[in-house]
Image (cartoon, rainbow, N blue to C red):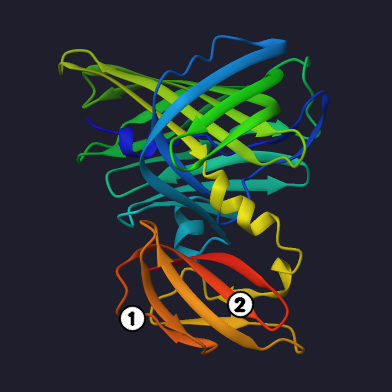
Amino acid sequence: MKIKLLFLNFCALTLLANAQAPINNYFSTAMSEYAAVTGTIDHSPSGAGASWVFDPLSPSGTNVDTYMAPTAAQLATYPNTTEVLTITDGSMNENQFFYELAGSTLSLTGASNAEFSIDYNTDNALIGTYPLTFGTAPTVDAIAGQLMAQGQSPTYTGTITTEVDAYGMLDLEVTGLGSYNGSITRVRTEQNIGFTIAGFFPGTLDIVSYNYYKDHDGALVFRSTDGAIVVNGLGINETFATNEALITNTLTTDENQQALGLVKLYPNPADVYLNVELSASETIASITIIDVNGKTVLTTINKTIYIDDLTAGLYFVNITTNKTAVTKKFIKK
């Protein structure tokens, strides 16, 4: 039972943190781009004043986070969902995570991809009630529902534990894609699940996620998940791991543009046409669309851009107007 495609990112996006200050928000910034990375990563430092060095890291692919309200079909499958996070990789594979935000309380209602899904339909997975702070007791909640993979759909029970467990300094560099050195706050989430397949084969699924957030702007700069699944009697004993770093060189381009909010792209993701919206006083000088390999794939001066011929994936749009120049991102479906 291979479930790693979903749980490589599972529970990696739940809180937005500021060191030693209350945690008041969650979710990554929409359209944040992450690099899947390999290298030496040691999560063992914890507590106050911790220090982590993830350097250097090698990229092996990219993922993009988008958010939408649930559809009627999603609500039917994952009741009480209010927000859907979709993580899309460069091959347009999607992992989706379903959340319920009720006032200041956040819970997971489900997660799915093409090969695996987990439904917390019996007992949702409470992540926490905000604000949360470092040094407070972990949030521990019972969870229960149904797993679905490879034609099997066992019910499960277990627990989820979330804690703001550390703050300190993080030093990381992704070769060719940027670096970060500064203060962060870390959130640790652990799930322990038990189930039985076909009524005879007991199994366990254990997942631990670490999420590192910048203190100065709350951006999720690094996320990591490790897990293991064991099914006695079926010879299943697998481990899985993923590490993702925020691609800071492209995001810095966006963050340094004072007029970034005046330029909008829609729809995003886009299929056949992509529209550029400017303020009334601006006119387009040039638009260049660049793929993730740095290749220019389209140039135009039109506000409505025909993109049906582009390959599905992530693109960067360099927009020059009579007043400024900005870089935006979009996903071609």
In the picture shown, does residue 321 fall above or below 87? below
Residue to which mark 2 is pinned: 320
Q: Are marks 1 and 2 in contact (CB under 8 Å)?
A: no
Q: Earlier in the sequence, mark 1 or mark 2?
A: 1
Residue to which mark 1 is pinned: 308
Query: SS of the residue at dot 2?
Result: strand
Give the quadrant of the C terminus: bottom left
Where residue 258 sits, quadrant-wise, is bottom right
Whole-percent x, y for residue 248 in the image = 57, 44
What residue is shown at x 21% (from left), y 27% (from top)?
Answer: 198
Q: Is residue 185 left or right of residue 234?
A: right
Look at label 2 and name its amino acid. Thr
Whole-percent x, y for residue 80 in the image = 60, 51
In the picture shown, does residue 118 fall above or below 300? above
What residue is shown at x 54% (from left), y 60% (from top)?
Answer: 70
Q: Is residue 49 left or right of residue 149?
A: right
Where residue 135 sits, quadrant-wise, is top right
Whole-percent x, y for residue 182 in the image = 70, 28
Look at label 1 and name its amino acid. Asp
Q: Which numbered dot is residue 56?
A: none
What residue is shown at x 57% (from left), y 66% (from top)?
Answer: 328
Neighbour tally class for label 2: few under 14, some 14-19, many 20 plus, Cα within 10 Å = some
Give the quadrant of the N terminus: top left
Query: SS of the residue at dot 1?
Result: loop
Disc 1 vs disc 2: which is toward the camera?
2
Q: CA distance from mark 1 to mark 2?
A: 23 Å
